[in-house]
Image (spheres, coloured by chain):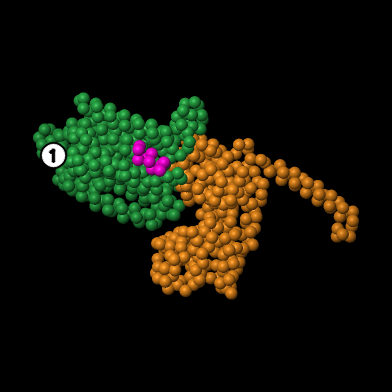
Amino acid sequence: MGALTRAVALLALLLLVALFLASSVGAADVSWRDAIAGDATARAILFGIRLPRALVAALIGAALAVAGVTFQTLLRNPLADPFILGVSGGAACGAAVSTALGFARVPGLVPLVAFAGACAATAAVFLLARRRAHTDPTRLLLSGLVLNAFFSAVILVSFALSRQSDLTAALRWMMGTLFGATWSDVVLLAALLALAMATLVFVANDLRMLAFGEDDAKSRGVDVERIKLIGFAAGSVVTGAAVAVSGIIGFVGLLVPHLIRMIWRRDFRFLLPLCALGGATLVVLADLVSRVILPSSELPIGAFTAILGVPFFLSLLRRGR
Amino acid sequence: MASRNPRLLRDFRTAAVRRGFCLALLVLACQRAPAPGTRVVSLAPNVTEMIYALGDGDVLAGADVASDFPAPAKALPKVGNGLTPSIEKIVALRPTLVVAIAAGLHPNLPRALEAQHIPLLVVRTDRLADVPRAMSQIRDRIGRSRRPAVASMLHALQQQRRARAKPPRILFVVWGDPLYIAGRDTFTDDLFGICGVRNAASVSGWPQYSLESLIAAPPDLLLYPDRSVSRAQIERLAARAKLTCPRIAVDENVFVRPGPRMAEAAAALNRIVDQWAH
């Protein structure tokens, strides 16, 4: 227990530092000191723009990492992540198709369809992989890969049919951005993430059993199919919400759980909070870099989750931990 | 009749002077100064040009990085690119109005500005007829009308209207590799209509265009913007499609910015076509 507390405290501290940095640095020349002194512009920028954006980054990072570690545990496959399983692809496909249909001009409609796309993709992957009341992890992964190819094709066709003016927005969305994040995004994401985390904590013990193999888990009285469904639903809901808010931010779901496992090597109950905190820290830092590195434009945040994460990942891999 | 009756003429003149005076008063009354502290941030170069053309350049507090015309626009504080401007920089400029174009609007921008209680005006500039409408909308929101800019732009465009016995078929290339062109239902196509020329492409919008279509229906003239497309690209394209027509670079910022300089684009296009016809 002591180890968990220490690890959580360390990562929480890192996240706080990242949040402080992200809310202190930006395009406008304002500081926390100005805001505390009562400067209206500084307050508007820090509390209205930077802080909600940093918090949305943290929540999205946590959501993607939690989804990743859940999928990896469920499938006992280190490659499983929301992208490989087609969940993000489903969300992106929903967004692209609704953009081609002109939904982009109705506020809030594209994210809603993206969310529905993520859920539909999960259902499809699950149904495809299911045979005789049993879900085979390999078939599940393969179904995800094949569906991803299909989603990519639909996305390309939708883009070709989209109006030029909608296309720019759609492309930005595909690249992933936290541009314009507001407090309502924070509330939405926090609520869904809390719900998913609570559900996962509730079934964490059963999920941990799955790591020893399905037959073993069954013999210990775990309702394997039920746990798979719950885990998948929770992972998909948070992925869908994250993608609906920010577009596609790749790599977090794969990278973070592996990083955490390389450092601490623990079971699911231990990994869940650590992945949430690690994912949050990574995306907050990636977003900070993506928006301050160039003075006049923001770069795709997905590039920086990889640029920041991969060297760290590779160095751990080489040390063979 | 008036010249045969001096008294009637004098009465007429007096009445005219009075009427003119009243009209002048009315015009003066309409020329409100902008509400004190009006500060506008423009998020598109054509919007910036419109605001300057309206004579309201002094209310501009900032603009996107592409806003470079007229010259004073270059000195405006920049808030980043138009699609993903820095909201922080916008807020720091304390604008009372942000103007953006519908074609380059990030879906998250309206609610981000709304959260900051900054009013946003989104104007459409997809077609030529949208330009005067957008200018009127901006003028109404800024709240003064020092120059009859909209009327003079429409007049200037009208002056460029041509009916040609043998209208050339023109292809306007907007991107070289892959080939993208200006199709029907675009402001460029509307410009063609004013100048009495035909669009060599029959597809609508700004589509990627096939080399086969280009070879099957070669244009009489090929135009391309001088910044986004290079001479070498066009020559490669011409070689592949066996084009023999003249290929002319045009001022990109005049031709592809649906703004107050569209009449200038029409005049330039007429000059090119007149030269071609001779």
Q: What shade does chain A have?
A: green
Numbered range of the magenta stretch? A284-293
Magenta residues: mostly which secondary structure?
A: helix
Q: Position of residue A200 (x, y in %)?
A: 24, 33
Q: Is residue B192 left or right of residue A305?
A: right
Dot 1 crowding, Cα within 10 Å, few <14, some 14–19, many 20+: some
Q: Position of residue A264 (x, y in %)?
A: 20, 33
Q: Residue at x 63, y 52 (%)?
A: B150
In the image, residue A257 sits, relative to residue A141, either above or below, namely: above
Q: Is residue B267 left or right of residue A134?
A: right
Query: Does the stretch in magenta take in B63?
Result: no
Q: Residue at x 35, y 31 (%)?
A: A17
- SS state under label 1: helix
Quarter of the image where one finds residue A113: top left
Report the residue marked by disc 1.
Answer: A214
Q: Quadrant of the C terminus of chain A?
A: top left
**Whether residue B226 is visible:** yes
In the picture, one chain is orange; tell me its letter: B
Q: Please give the chain letter of the residue carrying mark 1.
A: A
Q: Position of residue A70 (x, y in %)?
A: 23, 38
Q: Is residue B33 left or right of residue A26?
A: right
The amino acid at mark 1 is: Glu
**Whether residue A113 is visible:** no
Give A283 or B26, whichever is nearer the viewer: A283
Give A81 or B68, whichever is nearer the viewer: B68
Give A180 or B192, whichever is nearer the viewer: A180
Q: Residue at x 15, y 37 (%)?
A: A211
Q: Position of residue B220 (x, y in %)?
A: 50, 71
Q: Residue at x 81, y 51 (%)?
A: B16
Query: Does the stretch in magenta take in A288?
Result: yes
